[in-house]
């Protein structure tokens, strides 16, 4: 893949900044998708798209951009999951991929009960340390929406952690 | 203790925890928290929550990056896999103008192909055991088979030549697909190994190849120009990959 616009050094810099983000993307994806395999699939797809768009990337914050790609990929994944849920269990190659790490299982379970966009906000702010402004850009919503999602997510997780565990069975 | 002149809002409590609060307001919030234990308790619970998140997920940062996520490897995926979506992202880029552009982009979803792959695996299992009637149109009528399936399916169905890897076209049949007709082609090797190629209209224009195993069968699935392909075979993944690459290269050349 050649960088037509940017010189070879710029391309290297781009790749370096993408590469430096892989561990953090994996962390975010794992918390977001709660399944190690699906999480790494998401990261892989994110990287493929990032490199594909290398020539189109005219500067800006690579970090935010990668989080944006991953967040949207997960949203689409969940959307099609919801459309055809009955197909999932049969193809579940690795049912034990999640939930094996007993430690901190409660926080993971609490995350699982959050609405998708609330979980993303909570993780981007609290785990990945992004600013409200960055999260607003990632989700393409006003900052006020980010703040209300964050407030609702925190209240919900707090309630779950404190024992109001909703009788939700995890849908895989 | 003096109350802050302006009452502290819920938003400000969050902003305080997230370091989003203007420095000059921090003192006010701290004074407020000292005077409002319930708010202080909530703020503390959010801080603990963040600590729990880090305790749970930070170890991933230190895990070695899996081979398949190494940038070298990701970049080495043949370029042709990537072409289709470039156009889409170009357009989206031009119209999106900001970080939101990707929302319009061609984001492929793995699970769509999982259900696709399931259909293909079912078809594979159903017909691969057939000795007398595995196909409707036999492989020696290749031209007729291709013309018929092309007409019914609505894209250019091409039965790839896999003789180079020892597989002969047994024939093909028409099957119901997720959103219309699907073409189903069967190949057989000298030792009786059978591979099938299932193709149907896909909702996603373009994806990478994905591997799924189910029982003794493995399947490799991808989409190209709006058509999803699944190559299914028993046993060895390397062998399956070899066959799938041949199929891929030929559908690419023909143009889906």
Image (cartoon, rainbow, N blue to C red):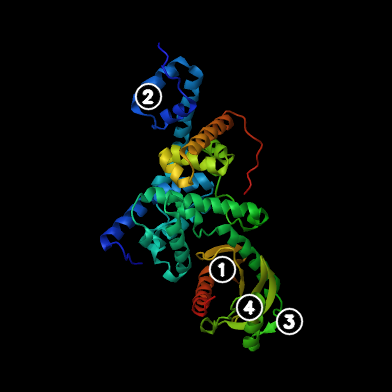
Q: Name the residue under label 3.
A: B132
Residue B6's spot in the image, x, y percent? 43, 19
Q: Is mark 2 on a helix, strand or loop?
A: helix
Disc number at residue B186? 4
Q: Residue at x 54, y 71 (%)?
A: B240
Q: Which of B29 and B68 is in front in this view?
A: B29
If you read the primary sequence from the N terminus, does the residue marked by circle 4 or circle 1 appear first? 4
Do discs 2 and 4 belong to a common subunit?
yes
- Placement of A63 over or under A105, stated as above or below: below
Residue B118 seen in the current view: yes
- Placement of A151 over or under B32, stated as above or below: below
Badge 2: residue crowd in 10 Å (few <14, some 14–19, many ≥20): some
If you read the primary sequence from the N terminus, does the residue marked by circle 1 or circle 3 appear first? 3
Q: Residue B127: which quarter of the image?
A: bottom right
Q: Mark 2 lies on which chain?
A: B
Q: Mark 1 lies on which chain?
A: B
Q: Mark 2 points at which residue?
A: B25
Q: How many labels does the image show?
A: 4
CA distance separating discs 2 and 3: 82 Å
Q: Name the residue under label 1.
A: B226
If you read the primary sequence from the N terminus, does the residue marked by circle 1 or circle 2 appear first? 2
Instruction: Tell which tag, 4 or 1, sits nearer the viewer.
Output: 1
- Placement of A20 over or under B222, stated as above or below: above
Disc number at residue B26? none
Badge 4: residue crowd in 10 Å (few <14, some 14–19, many ≥20): many
């Amino acid at each position: 893949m050649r960088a037509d616009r940017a010189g070879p050094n710029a391309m290297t810099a781009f790749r370096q900044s993408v590469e430096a983000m892989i561990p953090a993307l994996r962390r975010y994806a794992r918390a977001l998708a709660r399944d190690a395999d699906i999480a790494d699939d998401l990261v892989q797809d994110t990287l493929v798209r990032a490199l594909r768009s290398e020539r189109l990337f005219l500067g800006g914050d690579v970090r935010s951009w990668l989080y944006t790609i991953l967040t949207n990929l997960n949203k689409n994944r969940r959307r099609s999951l919801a459309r055809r849920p009955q197909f999932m269990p049969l193809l579940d190659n690795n049912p034990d991929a999640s939930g094996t790490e007993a430690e901190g299982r409660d926080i993971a379970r609490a995350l699982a009960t959050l609405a998708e966009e609330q979980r993303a906000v909570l993780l981007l702010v609290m785990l990945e340390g992004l600013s409200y402004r960055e999260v607003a850009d990632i989700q393409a919503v006003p900052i006020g929406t980010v703040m209300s999602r964050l407030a609702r997510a925190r209240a919900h997780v707090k309630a779950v952690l404190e024992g109001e565990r909703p009788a939700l069975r995890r849908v895989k | 203790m003096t109350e802050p002149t302006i009452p502290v809002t819920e938003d400000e409590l969050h902003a305080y925890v997230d370091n989003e609060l203007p420095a000059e307001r921090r003192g006010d919030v701290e004074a407020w928290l000292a005077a409002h234990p319930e708010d202080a308790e909530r703020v503390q619970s959010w801080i603990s929550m963040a600590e729990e998140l880090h305790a749970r997920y930070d170890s991933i940062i230190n895990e070695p990056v899996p081979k398949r996520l190494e940038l070298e490897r990701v970049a080495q995926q043949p370029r042709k896999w990537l072409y289709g979506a470039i156009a889409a992202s170009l357009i989206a880029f031009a119209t999106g103008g900001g970080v939101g552009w990707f929302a319009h982009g061609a984001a492929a979803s793995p699970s769509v192909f999982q259900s696709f792959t399931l259909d293909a695996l079912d078809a594979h299992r159903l017909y691969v055991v057939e000795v007398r009637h595995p196909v409707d149109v036999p492989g020696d009528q290749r031209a007729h088979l291709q013309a018929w399936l092309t007409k019914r399916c609505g894209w250019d169905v091409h039965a790839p030549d896999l003789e180079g890897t020892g597989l002969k076209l047994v024939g093909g049949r028409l099957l119901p697909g997720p959103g219309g007709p699907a073409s189903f082609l069967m190949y057989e090797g000298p030792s009786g190994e059978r591979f099938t190629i299932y193709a149907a209209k896909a909702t996603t224009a373009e994806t990478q190849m994905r591997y799924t195993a189910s029982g003794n069968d493995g399947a490799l699935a991808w989409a190209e120009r709006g058509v999803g392909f699944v190559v299914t075979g028993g046993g060895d993944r390397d062998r399956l990959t070899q066959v799938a690459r041949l199929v891929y290269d030929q559908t690419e050349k023909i143009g889906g």
